[in-house]
Amino acid sequence: MKLIIQIPSFNEEQTLAQTIEELPRFIPGISEIEILVVDDGSTDRTVDVARAAGAHHVLHLETNRGLARAFSLGVERALALGADVVVNTDADNQYRAEDIALLVEPILQRRADMVIGCRPIIDHPEFGPAKKLLQLLGSETLRMISKTTVRDAASGFRAFSQEACMRLYIHSRFSYCMETLIQAGNSHLRVESVNIRVNPQTRPSRLFKSVPEYVKKSGGTILAMFILYRPGRFFGLLGSFCLTGALVIGVRFLGVTYVNPPPVPSITYHVPSLIFLAILAISGVLLLALGVIGELIRSQRRLTEETLFQLRRQGAAQATQSAKKISGKVLNGISPDPAYQGDGQMRVAA
């Protein structure tokens, strides 16, 4: 069983060495542990620090792609390296490295496909009252959309089985945390959460500069994912709201005109209401039509994702076979092919 610990990094030369140093080298049930640093276009010495600290692989992106894209490329690289389990942790050493054993345990026991490390939000010493409230509300919203029971939806300390990695497709650029959780729930992957500990903060968050910015980005991501993964319900709710408003105005017009007509009937008095009724009715029908179209597109996307899953599974199987061949050559005293030599570095152009 091979575990790859993935660390997305952007200008982390100050904290990366300590993060790598504290990572476990042995976990019961794991035969191999390798460290993969995903350098997201850093302009400092992050790459040099990663190599000097003992990272087995460095995936260097030529330009800054954002955390979500760096995570996605790192997962693809981990699969190509033959990972059976992938753990993602932050380069700022936010999470306790020894708790990685807690993350991988449900996967090793085949109880879960994805495990989320839940921070002590209420008792977190560095979370203010506003952030605690937003974390709790955001997690509650994500639980409803993703149909999971995770208590800390924003936690980046996660473990993924090989199948979960193959089924994840990241669309957003802000953060993978919410999207992967929604995908997992809607793909019927088994999701568990475990309590983990955190280290003292080493630097402010780079994903957002203020609470309003966090709310804006997180809210936009949740809304986009809701539309993407549950278009029928989203547009159906909006369409039903518009049609209900049109029905109320229509009943009111009939009641005023025919049930209790005024002394001097005049339909022109109700023209604004009738125009509003027409707008609501047309909008409701169009929104319901968008919901139907969205569900058709969603079905097509599922077929595409299943095709990509099969391709990824074939690629992972080939990577495993190649690794076994290389191990066999080494055991027999034969040097591996030159194509497999090197320090594991991979460069991705812009």
Image (cartoon, rainbow, N blue to C red):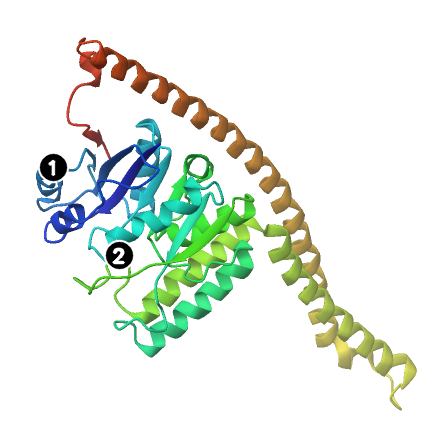
Image-quadrant location for residue 300: top right
* Image vertical order of residue 73 relative to residue 264, above or below: above
Kind of residue at disc 2: Tyr
Q: Is residue 203 left or right of residue 188?
A: left
Considering only vertical position in the picture, is 71 above or below 313?
A: below
Q: Amino acid at mark 1?
A: Arg
SS at mark 2? loop
Q: What residue is drawn where x is 39% and y is 48%?
A: 172
Quarter in which the C terminus is drawn: top left
Q: Secondary structure at mark 1?
A: helix
Left or right: 53, with 133 as reference point: left
For the N terminus, the image quarter is top left
Q: Quadrant of residue 317?
A: top left
Compare residues 150 and 195 and report the one nearer the observer: 195
Query: Looking at the image, which residue sits at the far front?
Result: 28
Q: Quadrant of residue 345?
A: top left
Residue, disc 2: 95
Image location (x, y in percent) of residue 133: 40, 74
Q: Residue 68: percent from the left, percent from the top? A: 34, 47
